[in-house]
Amino acid sequence: MSSASSPPVIGRAPPEPRITVAGLTMAYGSFIIQKDLSFTIAPAEIFVIMGGSGSGKSTLLNHMVGLQAPATGDVLYDGQSLWHAEGEARDRLRRRLGVSYQAGALWSSMTLAENVALPLETFTDLPPRQIQEIVSLKLALVGLAGFEEFYPSEISGGMLKRAGVARAMALDPDILFFDEPSAGLDPITSRRLDDLILDLRASLGATMVVVTHELASIFAIGDRAVFLDNETRTMIALGNPVKLRDECPEAKVRAFLTRGEQGVGGSGG
């Protein structure tokens, strides 16, 4: 019998990361956008990517969903590498991801139902009737029941954003990405979209990554946030947004999180 004893376990062990960004450097040729990015995202966490205009927020999202390859580093989902996986293995990983883009990215010539059905028709062998049922469910989840036959030009900006979310959820991903979801929306509509994101996390248990510069959204929905810095071209802060606002040693992070409406920041990625 060993004389050594195991240390006591106090509380729950932290969950295994759902997403790991490991030593990621993003570049266009020799021009480095951001370097040495390393952080993890827990299951069911709402994680915010923030920073000033041109800091690479949306570019980081594109690297995380497999649209742009890193110069160095990797992105892992439940320990599986996205950028070292090949063929069907990479396709399986990418099918776990749903993305809602800034402008909604809906086809103007298609109804909302046709837009949401498109991923199902492309990536599954489901019969039309079942696809129709799934489409109706997804639109109902985002508060658009009854708008199946409307075209994008016939609905408001806030409804367009929600329709984009419905399409992002079409294949039942367990990880959702939002690129500037509140851009161009009035404060009331923006708050409703924040509430939708919180409701979806509560009902689906999905992990969410949100690119935004909107302070109201950052504080309303963010469990943790990473700050991408333009000058040093790397991350300079990581943590709960409220704690970063009040306690971060980096003055520019505190300034970003306490700015007025006309202060620092911008909608660019």
Image (tube, rainbow, N blue to C red):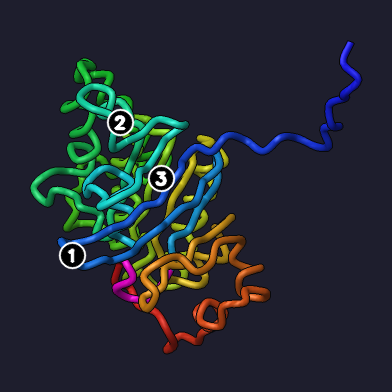
Residue bearing mark 3: 142
Marks 2 & 1, CB-CB < 8 Å contact: no
Rendered image quadrant of residue 60: bottom left
In terms of depth relative to the viewer, which is nearer, 160 or 32? Answer: 32
Rendered image quadrant of residue 1: top right
Range of magenta residues: 51-56
- SS majority, magenta: loop
Q: Tell me the residue at 57%/57% (across/down).
A: 224
Residue bearing mark 1: 30
Work out which residue is located at the far top of the displayed protein and give it.
1
Q: How far apart are labels 2 and 3 at the CA level?
A: 21 Å
Residue bearing mark 2: 95
**Residue density around tag 1, few if under 14, some if 14–19, many if 20 or more, within 10 Å:** few
Q: Relative to 255, is 89 on the left or the right?
A: left
Q: Tell me the residue at 23%/22% (across/down).
A: 88
Q: How far apart are labels 2 and 1 at the CA level?
A: 31 Å
